[in-house]
Image (cartoon, grey):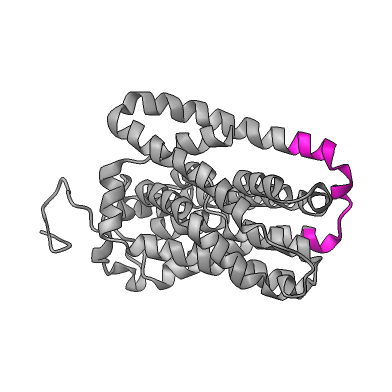
Amino acid sequence: MLALVMFSMGCTVNAKKFWGHIKRPWGIIVGFLCQFGIMPLTGFVLSFIFNIHPIQAVVVLIMGCCPGGTGSNILAYWVDGDMDLSISMTTCSTLLALGMMPLCLFIYTKIWVDSNSIVIPYDSIGISLATLVIPVGFGMLVNHKWPKAAKIILKVGSISGAILIVLIATVGGILYQGSWLIAPELWIIGTIFPAAGYTFGFFLAYVAGQSWRRCRTVALETGLQNTQLCTTIVQLSFTPEQLSLMFTFPLIYSIFQIVFAAIILGGYRLYLRLPGKGKKDLVEEGSTDYSNEVHSVGWHETKNPGFQSEENPNGKVSNGMIS
């Protein structure tokens, strides 16, 4: 079922717009730094500070190394984010996870692996990722060849994703009932981790000079992880005894990433209700995907040529600038 979800995610990718971000990769680079720089490091720091069980530290790091989830694309749409950037970041992080997840785990789990308290099954993790990345590629092909069919598959995949989350939580809760009796530190980490992802993602995008709509997009892509992928990797890679200590964390993270995402969405909608404020910002930022408008606040007035689209209804693009 997760393969179907990943396949449907690939069906959302427009090959031409995706290639446009690859040719001007500044947004992808910012997302990469957030996804495989900030998140694994945050997971490591939290695990070290709270001194949790080594196997639990590993699942925290696996979550931190996971690519962005498809839910980030939906939330990006609801907060008027850059949809093309959102989908490109999700797709690229999923493809890059094939190499980056094992690398990050190798780097950050050394203090536990070297103590012989745990062995990371890199082969199982690699196989799990490969079998889930391939459907994304097929989804992109379907969207390119048969866009109408891709829309239907996307709807089916979205419903399947929601069912999968409920199914995993229900079955896992029954099979690993003892896993809910965990140390409070893991609940604290599960609360802080997604909040830190949203915050650091937004801050890094802001420092990189991105527009407000792209800051919101990067923040959501950073904090909203693919918890289904994390759960699947954990279930396929570790023993039942280890699962009893690991299984709960992806569910905890999933709960709080949704809670904080709802807070972000609610805050943004309230912001739009401010007299004149929301309408003004929407006009400045632009309401269409791949918009070249930026929020005219401070040094965000500067346009980054790395994000210029190839076509614009109001003019032509030459060397990354609109004329």
| 218 on left or right of 256 | left
Quarter holding the N terminus is top right
The one nearer the camera, 22 or 100, is 100
Residue 264 lies in the magenta-colored region: no
Q: Does the magenta stretch mainly form a helix, a strand or a loop?
A: helix
> Residue 175's quadrant in the figure?
top right
- Residue at 39% across / 41% down in the picture? 137
Residue drawn at x 44%, y 52% is 95
Return the residue nearer the eye: 285 or 209.
209
Q: Locate residue 131 relative to residue 262 in the image: left or right.
A: left
Left or right, 141 with respect to 173, comes to left
- Residue 321, percent from left and from top: 16, 62
Q: Residue at x 54, y 47 (%)?
A: 69
313 or 42: nearer the viewer: 42
Q: Is residue 173 magenta?
A: yes
The stretch of residues the image draws in magenta is 169-186
Asked whether the viewer can see residue 175, the reply is: yes
Residue 187 rendering spot, x and y as whole percentages: 78, 58
Can residue 194 be spotted in the picture? no
- Say above or below: 317 vs 157: below
Return the x and y of residue 105 as percentages of the image width and height. Answer: 61, 65
Q: How many marks?
A: 0
The quadrant of the image that shows the C terminus is bottom left
